[in-house]
Every structure is written in structure tokens, then in C-alpha cells.
Image (cartoon, rainbow, N blue to C red):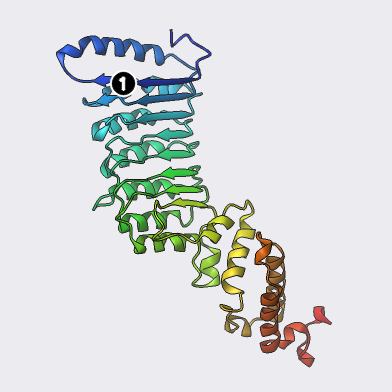
Amino acid sequence: EIGKNKHLHKMVVGGLRVVNTISSVREHEQLELFCKGINTNRSIADFTILNCHFVNDGSMLQVLEPFFEKNHRLSSLGIRRCNLGSAGICSLSSSLIHARFIKKIDLSNNNIDGDSIRELVKALYLNHDLEELNLAGNSIGGENNAGCLALAALLQKEQSTLKRLNLRRNDINDSGAIILAESIKENRSLTHLGLGGNIAITSAGWNALSKVVCNPSSIATTYFCNHTLSVVTCGHLHYPLPRPSLELNKLPNKIQVARQKIFQHHFQRENFRIEPFIDMEVSQLIQVVKFIDIAHAELADYRMRNEHARYSILFLLLKNIPQIFGVNGNRTHPKLR
């Protein structure tokens, strides 16, 4: 009946126990009938398997391969608290290779380790629609960081569509956090990253993630940092990421975001350095003045607008490079006359 149903959009399967024993023959027969029916279904968009205990090789998930491949309406897949382990995730991965239209995958609390994640990433790499991936409550961290390295490849994928990645409670340490930070630097899709409950991440890991969001070392590093990631959950307040930069990243205009970060970190009186501008051409310096004026005018938070600070910067430019304002006789720029 499931296969013939054209109106069923959401389905939750719970409480199955799939084992390899003679006493479970009847259960397997029922399971085969279920799989046969669902494999011909083309209407289910949201499919969840919940609290099912897979203690065999996860072959049931391979049996569902036709469902994943041919049901193009399937956009959300959840397999939660099912003890998939290495065998289960490998079986699932071989099936997901054909599921290229799924936008949301939830594999939380499944006893998945880092080595197994590599197989999953190989399958997801072929998916061009994936927006959410929940791997919370597994063990993808660890000393070899295999899971973090695999996910880094997914995050560095060209034209990535992944917007939310939940890695809470995954035994990730500083090395894993740094690997993830490096992979996010040039990512232009990820907006939410969940890392709460990874107590092995210390200041070293959080600082690496902070610099991804805003690196104030120079104007260039600030410009080329990540302007998309806007929410990073850490589960505690020991090492908070720079909230102003995360808030700025929520703005849709990324040129404006970059401009604001540069303005706030390099064009405030307390951190402004005149040296880089001393040898600039006057035409370039004019653009600097325009930049200061535009950035100050478009501040997202009007309370941050500080006319005194803006005029202080302009005064420093006037004092050290008077020709930019047409004050130094023969060096006056034509456009300023």
C-alpha cells in the first residue's frame, strides 16, 4: 500500500530491531515487504528511521537504495539513534550515492567514527542540493582526525551548498577544530556550525575559528576572511567567537560586510596606522577617504556611528598627507580644486 500511495509526504519508522538470528525470520520477512513497498513510493519527501537497532551489517539500508535513487521528492532523511556504527554507515553511504536531491540529512547519535565518515563524504560529494547535515552525538573526532579531514573536503567543495553543519558532542579536539577552520576560510555557503560539547577544544581551536570570521592582522587578511558564517555554537562561554563579526556576516551584501570589518578593525582611532598610506598615490588616497565615509554611513548599528572617531581619522590623514585634501600647494590633486 505504501508504494501505491501518492499522498504520503512524511513517514517515521520507529522501534525496529534488525538482527541476524533464526528467531528473527518473521521480522525479516515483514521488513522485506516494507522495503518492497517503500522502494516503489514516489511521494514521500520526509523519511525518518528512529530508535531502530541495527546490529547486523546494515544491509536493510542497502535494500532501500531504489527508494533513495528513484524518489526525487525525497528532500529530508533522518536516521537517528539507530546504532549504525561502521557497517551501517558504509551500507547507507553506498545507497546515498544515488540520492542526489536530498537537502537535509540527520544521522545524530549513531555511534559513527571518523573513519566511517569518509565513506559518507564520498557519497555526499555527489549531492549538489545538500543544505543541512546533522552528525551530533557521534565520534568523528579522535586522535587521527580522519572525520574532520573528510568533512574539510566536503566544506572545500567547489560550489558547496551546505548551510548548516552540526558537530556537537563529537570528541573533536584542537587539531580537529583547526582543520575545520582552515576548510571554512573560503567557504561561501556555511552559515551555522555547531561545536558545543566538544570539551577538548581549548583556546587554540577557538582562536583559529575566530580568525576565520575576522582576522585583524592586516587589511588584506580582514578582507579575505569568511563573511558568511554567522552562528557558531560552542556550548559554553569560555572561548566566545567575535559576536560583532558574526552579526555582520548575516548581512546579504558581502562587500558591505568586508568593508565594515575593515572599517571597524583598521579605521578606528585606537587602531589606525598611518604608515601604509604615506606613500600612496593621491588618487588612491581619495578612495580611502571615500571608503571611510561610505563605511561610516552604512554602519548596521547606528549607535556605533562615531563622528568624532571619523573626524579623528580624517585629521590624521590631513596632518600626515595634506595633499589629499588639496592643502599642499603644487601637490593639489585636480579633482580636489
Is residue 333 found left or right of 91 in the rendered image?
right
The image quadrant where one finds the N terminus is: top left
Q: Residue at x 35, y 12 (%)?
A: 34
The image quadrant that residue 288 belongs to is bottom right
Q: Which SS class for mark 1?
A: loop
Q: Residue at x 21, y 11 (%)?
A: 25
- Which residue position is annotated with label 1? 15
Q: Nearer the viewer, residue 92 or 283?
A: 92
Q: Disc 1 residue type? A: Gly
Q: Residue at x 40, y 37 (%)?
A: 124
The image quadrant that residue 206 belongs to is bottom left
Q: Position of residue 326 (x, y in %)?
A: 78, 85
Is residue 147 found left or right of 48 in the rendered image?
left
Q: Nearer the viewer, residue 76 or 334?
A: 76
**Extreme residue in the left direction:** 22
Q: Residue at x 50, y 44 (%)?
A: 163
Is residue 177 visible in the rendered structure shown here? yes
Q: Position of residue 111 (x, y in %)?
A: 27, 37
